[in-house]
Amino acid sequence: MVDILITGSLIFTGEEIIKNGYVYISNGRVEAVGEGVVPEEYTYATLLIGGTGRIIVPGLAAIASVASYPLRFKKPSMRDRVNFYRETGIKNLLLAALPAIYELHMSGVTVIIAEGLTVELPLELSKLIGGFYGLAIPACSGIEPMYTPGLASIIKLSSRDCEGEAEIIEINERGYKGSKPVLSLFNTISYSIPASTIEDPWVENLELRRALMLPPSTIKPGKLAEIAVYDVSKPPAMLLDMASEQDVMKIYKSGAKLETLIAGEDILVDGGDHLYIVEKHFREARALAEKLLSR
């Protein structure tokens, strides 16, 4: 059992702003959120995170074709991605997905709905890395979603070249109705659309969660921990913790350093470094990408 105490100059709970506050997590769930001095019973936590110049916010949800990340500059259609999933073994699909998972996590994403054909991909990602995962099945694959314990959600996708009844529809290969399939929320290079077209990642996160029938991500007692901690003590985004509420909501796109990312009992990012996806994985994924692109 790991108890975590997070302190920060500002907390956005998903519903309100708290200045100079704290969040206490026990067994992967938020136990307390407050303002001012931390109560003594919470000062003996196993892990202390945050401090002055930190902004604490809820984690985001995103839907993305993570396993086709090595092919992202080719911008494959959904039907082409389906063929890729069918032709590629689970070991290579997992390897191909790791850079995308890293990019999503470093953008503050705690729930990842991975496009694919079998539950094996998100279940293995959850086992290897941690965090929350779901599965988005392309409608033209002929595969029907089935409830699977351990997954956040299973849905069907459709697009102009992959038609069928689906909960979420890809619009003009540029975005999803209800969300956009972006692997980075602030970098200039994203999976399929320019980051500048993402007006408000927080709002899109809420829309996607509604489409997936997931509860909104909030930092409240009793809720599973989905928490991102950003360091705004130095550029970029320095002093953002002193800004207005409207400006604080820009944290997801500000370029601020993600210092910590927590999803339930899993600490995915600590001290600005991913704990499970490392340089070795990037080298292996690059070798796979070179092999795929040479075909």
Image (spheres, rainbow, N blue to C red):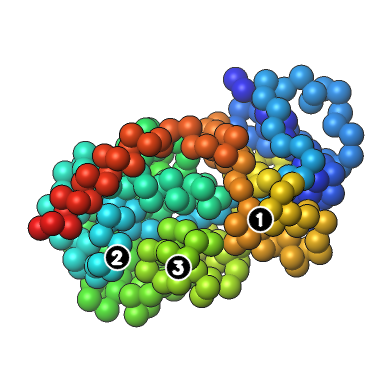
Label 2: how many residues lie within 10 Å, few (<14), some (14-19) or many (20+)?
A: few
Q: Nearer the viewer, residue 271 or 42?
A: 271
Q: Secondary structure at mark 3?
A: loop
Q: Are marks 1 and 2 in contact (CB under 8 Å)?
A: no
Q: Nearer the viewer, residue 153 or 4?
A: 4
Residue 16 on image: x %, y %: 78, 56
Read off the residue under disc 3.
Answer: 180
Residue type, numbered disc 1: Pro
Read off the residue under disc 1.
Answer: 236
Which image quarter: residue 53? top right
Which residue is painted at 73% across and 54% down in the image? 238
Q: Is residue 263 left or right of residue 223?
A: left
Disc 1 versus disc 3: distance between alpha carbons? 25 Å
Residue type, numbered disc 3: Lys
Label 3: how many residues lie within 10 Å, few (<14), some (14-19) or many (20+)?
A: many
Q: Residue furthest left?
A: 295
Disc 1 versus disc 2: distance between alpha carbons? 28 Å
Relative to 287, say whether 143 is above or below: below
Q: Earlier in the sequence, mark 1 or mark 2?
A: 2
Is residue 140 in view from this perspective? no
Q: Secondary structure at mark 1?
A: loop
Read off the residue under disc 2.
Answer: 73
